[in-house]
Image (cartoon, grey):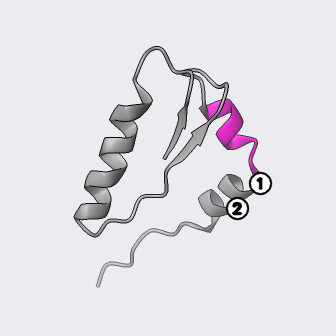
Amino acid sequence: MHHGAADDVIRPRDSRALAAAFDSLGAHARYTELPDVGHDCWDAAFQSEEVTSWLFAQRRARRD
């Protein structure tokens, strides 16, 4: 999860709470808060080599 610390549309604390809820259920969410970034945090997130590598490493679960 990525969230801009300067987001004035959705409060960062809401995303922090969502990440904590995932963690409490055993679905460990990685939360990254980007300083000085507003609601359009996807621009900064997708410029990250780490995010791009993670994204392209995902595979659909095999159905048996």
Front residue of this view, candidates 38 and 40? 38
Residue 39 sits in which quadrant? top right
Magenta span covers which residues? 42-49
Rendered residue at 70%/35% (across/down): 44
The residue pinned by badge 1 equals 49
Quarter residue 14 falls in: top left
Quote the CA–CA distance across marks 2 and 1: 6 Å
Q: Residues within 10 Å of mark 2 (few under 14, many from 20)?
A: few
Tag 1: Cα neighbours inside 10 Å, few (<14), some, or many (≥20)?
Answer: few
Where residue 36 sits: x, y (%)? Answer: 67, 25
The amino acid marked with disc number 2 is Ser
Residue at the image position 55 percent from the left and 66 percent from the top: 58
Q: Is residue 45 above or below residue 49?
A: above
Q: Are marks 2 and 1 in contact (CB under 8 Å)?
A: yes
Q: Amino acid at mark 1?
A: Glu
Quadrant in the rendering for residue 29? bottom left
Side of 34 relative to 58 (left or right): right
Which residue position holds label 2? 53
